[in-house]
Image (cartoon, helix red, strand yellow):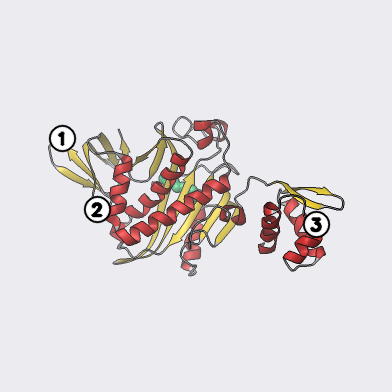
Amino acid sequence: MNRAAAVLGFLREAPGYVSGDLIASRLSISRTAVWKILRQLREMGYAFETLKGKGYKLKCSPDRLYPWEVQRYLETAFVGREIVYEDTVGSTNAIAFNLALAGCNEGACVIAEAQDAGRGRRRRAWLSPHGKNVYVSCVLRPALPPSEVSPLTFISCLAAFDVLKAAGLAPTLKWPNDVLINGRKVCGTLAELSVEPDAIRFAVIGIGLNVNMKESDMDEKIRGKATSLFLETRNCFERARVCGMLLNGLENYYEALRDLGTDEICRLWEERANIRGVPMEIVQMDKVYRGVSEGIGRDGALLLREENGRVTKVIAGDVSF
Ligand code: BTN
């Protein structure tokens, strides 16, 4: 697909119509190859204006997360530089996990238009309708012990937080891995690990960000609890751009994690989440903790001052306020 991406890039940069001969000579391919690529692009949803004697002009691009569309917005060194793109998958996390096992490079991503077995924390399902949202999983190989996995989920939440801020929204963070707007979930992230006793071999960071999903795309279970960029703004967003921005943020925060340590990521997360002094309840399997948050420990655990005055370190659970 590299040649098609090059043709598209050339047409995008051109101020007006571009002749097939010019495209062919600039990209050192035959005129027939240009014609075949344009046909292939049309089948993928691109539309071109053609003018006799002048050539082609890109009229519109489909709303698809094709790798070359996402990569137009990347400012990264390694995240998203290799993208496996599929129309529909079970779970992008599952595919990325297998890629990592097979030895893919750090930063390789799996992106899909839909998931029919999208998964969340605690084996919950992640609703993933076709062509509406962003479902992306990225392979990272951090030099961290498995006990410090929380800051890895935090970096994906911080990246999503920044994307939402840039869209003019006021997101909030909910421990450990949710991003909300007006109390409704707009993004969930899931870190899945392959570990040795004292090291993470690799981590797959999966991000589900609701972009153009409407109430009618939601099922009963999440209606009223979930939201999307569209629902909050009544505007449709270009998903490839949103995905590119998300991956830029992911790499930036990952580098901050590597260079400045988990303390800094936990500090940033805590600052954005603004949870110190907030009363909350945490349900952990059959246990319920109630108290006031004292922030986040350096390993990402939630510190809760319980009613008896004791500070408990909670490493997993569902928070409600
Ligand atoms: C949660 O809120 O519990 C986490 C949801 C994570 C969903 C994303 S969508 C992309 C990636 N693939 C999956 O199957 N899950 C994550």
318 is higher (above) or lower (below) than 261: above
Query: Mark 1 vs ligand 1: CB under 8 Å?
Result: no
Q: Is residue 65 left or right of residue 37?
A: left
Q: Earlier in the sequence, mark 3 or mark 1?
A: 3
Q: Is residue 50 left or right of residue 167?
A: right
Residue at far front of view = 15
Q: Is residue 95 left or right of residue 192?
A: right
Along the line of sight, the residue nearer the viewer: 230 or 112: 230
Residue 237: % across, % down: 56, 40
- Disc 3 crowd rating (10 Å Cα; few below 14, some 14-19, many 20+) is some
Looking at the figure, which quarter contains the C terminus?
top left
Residue 273: % across, % down: 32, 40
35 is higher (above) or lower (below) than 29: above
- Disc 2 crowd rating (10 Å Cα; few below 14, some 14-19, many 20+) is some
**Callout 2: SS:** loop
Nearer to us of marks 2 and 3 is 3
Q: Which residue position holds label 1?
A: 307
- Disc 1 crowd rating (10 Å Cα; few below 14, some 14-19, many 20+) is few
**Callout 3: SS:** loop
Inter-mark Cα distance, 2 to 3: 59 Å
Q: Are marks 1 and 2 in contact (CB under 8 Å)?
A: no
Q: Which residue position holds label 3?
A: 19
Label for residue 274?
A: none
Along the line of sight, the residue nearer the viewer: 208 or 295: 295
Q: Earlier in the sequence, mark 1 or mark 2?
A: 2
Residue at far left of view = 309
Q: Which residue position holds label 2?
A: 298
**Does the rendering let one see residue 124?**
no
Query: Which residue is painted at 55% across and 37% down in the image?
Result: 213
Q: Earlier in the sequence, mark 2 or mark 3?
A: 3
Nearer to us of marks 1 and 2 is 2
